[in-house]
Amino acid sequence: MRSLLVITNADAGTSDEATLATALAVLREEASVEVAKTSNPGELDGVLHRAGGRTVVVAGGDGSIHAVVTALHKRHELAGSTLALLPMGTGNDFARGNDIPLDIEEAARLVITGEARPIDLIIDETGTVVVNNVHVGVGAQASRKGAKWKTRLGSVGVGKVNLGKLGYPIGALLSAFHPPSWRLRVELDGKVVNDVDRPVLMVAIGNGGNVGGGTELNPDADTEDGRLDVMISRAVEPMAKLAYVAKLRRGEHDERDDVLTLRGKTVKVSGDEFWMSADGEISGPERSRSWRLEPAAYCMILP
């Protein structure tokens, strides 16, 4: 019988507990299951210390999968790990981008029947990991402003059909009226693909494509293809910003003439001070940051 270690948030609410119970009932039909609740990095590290080669099932959202991958990376145990995901977050962008069902019973069945496949990881020069996507410029501002809208609208609707996924586009629209353009040098695999004389609205680096609860920022990104997808938006004029946001909502922004899409292994961004949104976590300001792809960094159970 397979052995699973399910890691969940100790601060989860009553509705999350009920959702988790539904998933556990499915898992326990086919596997031996231990559930561990954690509320901080120290507790998480202690739980992972006793994982013992079991499949680690993350019951949570994008922040939870980021936390577990970060902890395993710090322990130098990521390469030998197999993870699975029960999507219980607000945005669930990592699940969306990897075709992991958002229905909790279907996701639990996937844990049992899915295939463990190697997937990629982004690592910056400080050793910080990015599981899904990192973006700078107006995108980070959109995440900051969109977070409250995602929370407000997430309760409007039922199940997958809710307005929470409009949070990021709304944040992008609000930000479009205020941010300056950024003068940034973007280097891809050592080659300058945008210099400071060409202002940009944002730069997105995708291992996965979805951010903000379903916005396809890097529509063609694939966590299994061994490449980073880089999107550079040069839509800096007022009307161009509005048109860009409208296209962004439909995942069609990459069709615009002022949007550049590229693929590579390493990316460096430098120039004006910028904020970053990495797996939904905002940090900065920075003047320079670089990222590299770590191909096949760990295994994830996927459809």
Image (cartoon, rainbow, N blue to C red):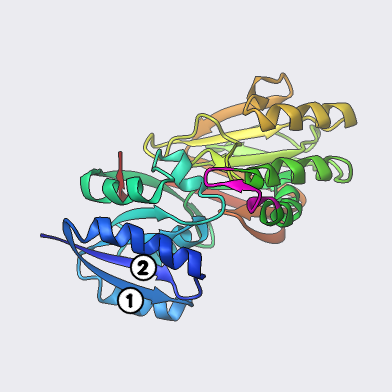
Q: Seen in the image, is 283 located left or right of residue 213?
A: right
| Pointer 1 or 2: first along the chain | 2
Residue 249 in the image: state x and y as whole percent: 68, 32
Q: Is residue 157 magenta?
A: yes
Q: Nearer the viewer, residue 41 or 285?
A: 41
Residue 129 in sight: yes
Label 2 belongs to which residue?
7
Residue at the spot x=43%, y=80% of the render? 42
Mark 2, Cα crowd under 10 Å, few <14 / some 14-19 / many 20+, is many
Residue 296 in sight: no
Residue 215 in the image: state x and y as whole percent: 61, 38
Residue 141 in the image: state x and y as whole percent: 75, 51
Q: Nearer the viewer, residue 229 or 209?
A: 209
Q: Are marks 1 and 2 in contact (CB under 8 Å)?
A: yes
Residue 64 in the image: state x and y as whole percent: 47, 62
Q: Quadrant of the C terminus?
A: top left
Residue at the spot x=28%, y=46% of the render? 110
Q: Is residue 231 above or below residue 182?
A: above
Q: Which of the two discs, 1 and 2, sits closer to the camera? A: 2
Furthest residue toward left: 1
Which region is colored magenta? 153-161
Q: Seen in the image, is 277 located left or right of residue 94?
A: right
Label 1 belongs to which residue?
47
Circle 2 sits in a helix, a strand or a loop, which is it? strand
Q: Tell me the amino acid under the disc marked 2.
A: Ile
Q: Tell me the amino acid under the disc marked 1.
A: Val
Q: Is residue 77 above or below residue 85?
A: below
